[in-house]
């Protein structure tokens, strides 16, 4: 194939670079890539990733209609599952799906047959899709940082990435399975099904819990004076700190830019964690001050996230807290216990969305006697 005539060597002035691209194009073409696919890959500057993409994609054997027929799950439902996972929905008659897609479709049908609500299973898939998107993006960066070398030709890098993917993707899959089981085991040790739920046959998604937010002071203003990479580095350091500090029964729900959200059935544990986070931030070099807010009360747990007035109060308390301090509601102080911390009154705070001000307190760890 004359890749020069096809225009796929344009923009490469160096003879070695042109030779390396031609070698890679020959290899991919021999493996079955069409000239049009190669053209798109060159235009989108992802030619070196095409061997890994083909490795992961597998052999396209089925259409969406085939999957619906063979799995026993309606085509409309299959499309809903793909959308929930954050994946594109192909044309019903396009032969773009693999044996793995068929097995996953059969698994979804098996869940339905086992009595799981399809609507709720789709919601769980939505949570999975969000998590896997983040994991995939993080894995992509890790691969690039690990295997990219200065002066790489396109052919060299493509070969190295393909070999690495062949060796490491099975490890990643096993790790995902193991981590899921570890988290399920940890959740089961702190969860319960009470008599009211056994009587009604329905698990309540509303429970009294401590909700906490911790955010970086002045993060928005900082964005006007430092570049995006520095900002993302600060957010990453906050995530690492939270991961190192948080222990059961406290759970890290999510990170939202410059803030982390925590929940715990134990108010004292939530306050302890926030105080430790604030102290860790104070001890960090070139790191903004941290502040936190904690509220206690009924909150709704829906598909791994939390909602309700208690969540809103905690978020707004964090915004009102002083740098290097934790601000809590009276309910948090009462649940944690007056002897758990050195408490000081912080006055009544008028928070958006509440009809009247609420009493607030600042906890500190007791000084050793």
Image (cartoon, rainbow, N blue to C red):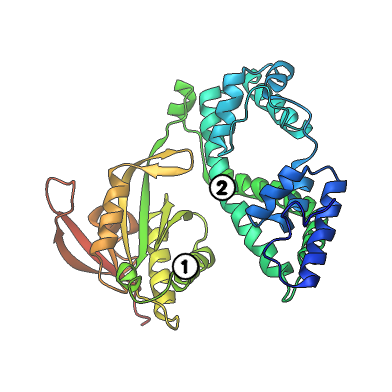
Describe the element under mark 2 as helix, strand or loop. Answer: helix
Q: Residue at x 81, y 65 (%)?
A: 20
Residue 96: percent from left, percent from top? 71, 32
Query: Quadrant of the rendered structure where residue 293 is?
Result: bottom left
- Please name the residue shown 14% across and 59% down the image: 348
| Circle 2 residues within 10 Å: few <14, some 14–19, many ≥20 | few
Q: Which residue is mark 1?
A: 232
Q: Quadrant of residue 302?
A: top left
For marks 1 and 2 on the same chain, the one whose residue lies earlier in the sequence: 2
Question: Relative to 258, does residue 116 appear above or below in the rendering?
Answer: above
Number of residues whose C-alpha sits closer than 10 Å to that of mark 1, classed few (under 14), some (14–19) or many (20 or more): few
326 or 224: nearer the viewer = 224
Q: Could you tell me residue 98's position as x and y percent?
A: 76, 33
- The residue at the far left in this view is 356
Judged left or right of residue 36, residue 249 is left
From mark 1 to mark 2, how far is it between C-alphas?
Answer: 19 Å
Is residue 214 visible from the viewing direction of this image? yes
- Residue located beneath label 2 in the image: 131
Q: Relative to the observer, which residue lies in front, 112 or 134?
A: 134
Figure check: 272 above or below 58: below
Name the side, left or right, on which 249 lies relative to 342.
right
């Amino acid at each position: 194939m004359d890749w020069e005539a096809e225009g796929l060597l344009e923009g490469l002035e160096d003879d070695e670079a042109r030779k390396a691209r031609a070698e890679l194009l020959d290899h991919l073409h021999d493996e079955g890539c069409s000239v049009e696919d190669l053209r798109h890959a060159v235009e989108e500057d992802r030619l070196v990733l095409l061997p890994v993409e083909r490795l992961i994609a597998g052999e396209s054997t089925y259409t969406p209609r085939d999957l619906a027929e063979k799995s026993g799950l309606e085509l409309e439902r299959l499309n809903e599952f793909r959308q929930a996972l954050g994946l594109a929905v192909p044309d019903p008659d396009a032969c773009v799906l693999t044996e793995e897609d068929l097995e996953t479709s059969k698994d979804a049908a098996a869940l339905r047959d086992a009595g799981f609500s399809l609507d709720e299973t789709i919601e769980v898939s939505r949570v999975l899709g969000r998590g896997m998107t983040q994991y995939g993006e993080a894995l992509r960066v890790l691969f690039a940082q690990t295997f990219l070398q200065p002066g790489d030709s396109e052919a060299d890098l493509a070969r190295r990435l393909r070999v690495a993917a062949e060796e490491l993707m099975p490890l990643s899959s096993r790790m995902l399975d193991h981590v899921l089981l570890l988290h399920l085991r940890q959740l089961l040790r702190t969860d319960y099904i009470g008599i009211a739920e056994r009587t009604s046959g329905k698990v309540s998604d509303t429970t009294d819990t401590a909700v906490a937010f911790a955010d970086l002071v002045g993060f928005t203003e900082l964005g006007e004076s430092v570049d995006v990479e520095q900002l993302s580095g600060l957010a990453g350091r906050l995530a690492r700190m939270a991961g190192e500090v948080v222990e059961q029964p406290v759970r890290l729900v999510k990170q939202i830019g410059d803030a982390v959200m925590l929940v715990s059935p134990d108010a004292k544990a939530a306050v302890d964690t926030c105080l430790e986070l604030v102290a860790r931030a104070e001890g960090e070099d070139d790191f903004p001050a941290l502040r936190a807010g904690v509220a206690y009360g009924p909150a709704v747990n829906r598909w791994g996230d939390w909602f309700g007035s208690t969540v809103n109060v905690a978020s707004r308390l964090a915004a009102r807290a002083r740098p290097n301090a934790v601000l809590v509601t009276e309910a948090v102080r009462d649940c944690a216990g007056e002897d758990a911390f050195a408490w000081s009154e912080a006055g009544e705070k008028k928070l958006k969305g509440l009809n009247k001000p609420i009493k607030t307190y600042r906890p500190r760890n007791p000084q050793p006697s």
